[in-house]
Image (cartoon, rainbow, N blue to C red):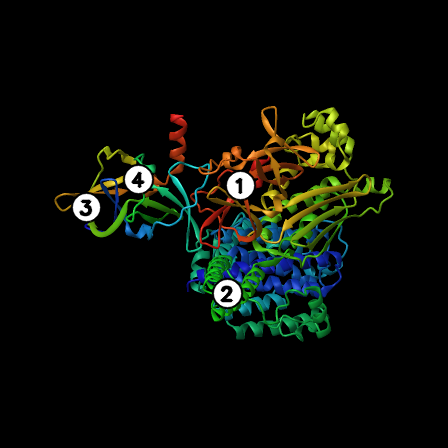
Amino acid sequence: MAEDIKVIVFKLATEEYGIEVDKVQTIERLMPITRVPKTYNFIKGVINLRGVVIPVIDLRGRFGLDEAEHTDQTRIIIVVVNEMEVGFVVDSANDVIDLNRESIDTPPEVVGGIKAKYLDGVAKIGEERLLIMLNLSEVLNKSEIVQLESFEG
Amino acid sequence: MDMNQYLSMFIDESNDHLQSLNENMMGLEANPDDLSIVQVIFRSAHTLKGMAATMGFEDLASLTHQMENVLDLVRNGKLVMQDFIFDTLFKSLDALEAMVQDITGGGEGKADVSSIVASLQAIVRGEVPSAQGGSAAPAAAASKETEAPALLDEFQLSVLEQSIQEGLQVLFIEVTIRKDCQLRAVRAYMVFELLERFGEVVKSFPSVQDIEQEKFDYSFSLYYISQKTAEEMQTLIMGVSEIDSVTSVALDVETLSQLARAEVAAAVEEAPPAPARENNPPATQTPAAAPKREEAKKAAPAKSAGTPSRTIRVDIDRLDVLMNLLSELLIDRVRLEQHASDIQSGELTETVEHMSRVSGDLQNIVMKLRMVPVDTVFNRFPRMVRDLAKSLDKKVDLIITGAETELDRTVVDEIGDPLVHLLRNALDHGVESVTDRIAAGKPETGSIQLRAFHSGNHVFIEIQDDGAGISREKVLKSAMNKGIVTAEQAAAMTDNEAHQLLFAAGFSTAEVISDISGRGVGLDVVKAKISSLGGNVTIYSTPGKGTTFSVQLPLTLSIIAAMLVRLGSEKYAIPLSSIVETGIVKRSQIRSVHSSKMVEFRGAHIPIVSLSAIFNVPDYDESSEEETEIVVIRKGDKLVALTVQDFIGQNEIVIKNLGKYLPSTQGISGGTILGDGQVALIIDANAFIK
């Protein structure tokens, strides 16, 4: 069980998050995004990734955090989940670490305002750092979004 | 051996063979005496059987084997083709198609075909249920079998020989049932069931049917192909109760040929025609003389087995990748052209120009690679029309022209279903019954013409029947009953408008209407599908003379001509195929009618829609402008004016979908990459017109 996984670490507001490296296709600098009208607010639009049109999600928006100004550090992480290619806009992404699966604990109910179901667990690295592992298929689950919206509306 | 790598090849080739079988069967039905077609059919079936057996699809192999048995009798002149045989063979083809379909879908190609097999076997035994037109020949063959029980015919012999060469066991099994057995047929049946499970009974003496009817003493013998050894089979059969003894001998080629010689000698005594067969070595399987083979080639011009293939199969996904790479190249080309004109270096400009030409040629070639003849869709129609005409008890000739017309693969993949619908419609509602046709003074056989041809940047596919035509009154009456049109509207309609009502949504869903109007089952679905392909359907009908459905399709779905427009900082592409015209209107010309905005356009008032309002464009608002540019778009007969800020110009664009995460967005049909590398969204004109 003491299996090591490689994790891409990125930042959103003050928290650090992790995505398993084999789900990540590339990490891109910010590029022009074409807005797509009539879709969810957190979908920033589509980009041209070397000839393929890929939708881009603002992860802050997805998690209900305030949107931030894009900076030099802003990155688009292209992930592939269930054959869907999607880009995540994150505040910065600059680390790859090895993580032992056993060091991932079940998540607490709420982490920085993010609902527990989007999380796979929380890993403690060293003394201070906490890494929030994302449950990507839940993050990308659209049916749940529709339900949520109709519920609130 | 891992067979998976051959699976796709097997599927492709099986489909080819099934197609050619279908075509040739149709040809044979039209010309039942042409034995050269039978040869072609036999060879196709034989190849199919071999492939299926190699791939381990036993059900497929054994069904084709049964078909071969029938075809073998036909080609040797022992059996005359007749309706029942055709029907059974067609049914077998359907079953084979279903099996291959199953394999394509990842299944094992298993199917319950026992009733078809029983029919085929009955035909081989000479029991054709319908009028026994040519009963003399099969009956003679059957009686010969009973007289000389050990006789293997040339075909069975070759099957056995091939099986030995393929490393299978060919066994001669003799089973004796205990004398005190009460139900001999049941025991025999159990033995056969056991045998069928582990292999294939090629021939049994007495025949299976006689055994079933208990027309045997206490023993029977059979030739059997299996992977099991003689000993294993012996033990297995002994496992059935009330079996007295089993002898099982494995045969090799040598003993087989001895057997064959002995049999031929026996046959010489009993049946004079038999020695003629001896002259043809069983293995070659091509007794037809050379001129006959040429005829066969004529019958199947597309796929003659011997000619080396000058084509290769390419996975469509790879072509898509090639297309993507090419479109990137084209985008880079535009950028290079821009840089070159900025830098103003003669040499660079020259190089870029050359590159432009090369990439242009490359684009043409790639587009051509994606083009396939509509034949690939059309070729299943003759069979369908034949079956449908039979079930409707109508007489119809299907005349296909322009099957070589080429269309982009993506369009061809989509167009099959709508065409099936239109053809069924023409056959069901268009062409009249034989009695009605005679009463109307027409030839009793109706005709349906299926035409494909190029015209400009479009392909037209037309389905024309010479039936009764559409009755305007009936259509209007049922449309009024359905509340689709009012009486005044109906009275004002031209014939053409009335015909278009058949495509109205409510029209098709009603069950009774098709009886009253004679047309209109699911045509709205057809129309929707064709519209989604960027095409159009129109109906022309003359009462008493017939009806034509004309389907207009774009040549390709992946590259289209589009008008690029600007809305603030955003760019959108509108497909040229849905644009009627562009223009400028003054604010003052826009009127409010029932709280919706209308504008006068060529004497009619059409709705005017603000694109920027619908798309919530952040940095453009036309309400302050004196004049506004409009694009008039069309869906069917309806027009809508869309307001835009600026026209950028016309461009050939490569259509990309927005990815799986955004499969459909209202008003947007996809994206395209512009020369500057940015993505522009393509407007789905259909979404703006209800």
Q: CA distance from mark 2 to mark 3?
A: 62 Å
Mark 1: secondary structure: loop
Q: Chain letter for mark 3, please.
A: A
Determine which residue is flagged by label 3.
A102
Badge nearest the viewer, 2 or 1: 1
User: Mark 3 or mark 4, which has the lower sequence index?
Assistant: 4
Badge nearest the viewer, 2 or 4: 4
Q: Chain letter for mark 4, please.
A: A
Q: Position of residue B501 (x, y in %)?
A: 70, 34
Q: Is residue B215 visible?
A: no
Determine which residue is flagged by label 1.
B645
Mark 3: secondary structure: helix
In this rendering, position of residue A86 left or right of residue B94: left
Determine which residue is flagged by label 4.
A68
Q: Residue at x 24, y 35 (%)?
A: A112
In the picture shown, does residue B214 fall above or below B582?
A: below
In the picture shown, does residue B175 fall above or below A33?
A: below
Determine which residue is flagged by label 2.
B171
Q: Do the dots labelled 2 and 1 sit on one chain?
A: yes
Q: CA distance from mark 1 to mark 4?
A: 30 Å
In this rendering, position of residue B485 left or right of residue A2: right
What is the residue that sits farthest to the left in this orientation? A127
Q: Position of residue B423 (x, y in %)?
A: 69, 45
| Front-lying residue, B148 or B67 | B67
Q: Position of residue A142 (x, y in %)?
A: 40, 37
- Quadrant for residue B522, please give it: top right
Q: Quadrant of the N terminus of chain B?
A: bottom left
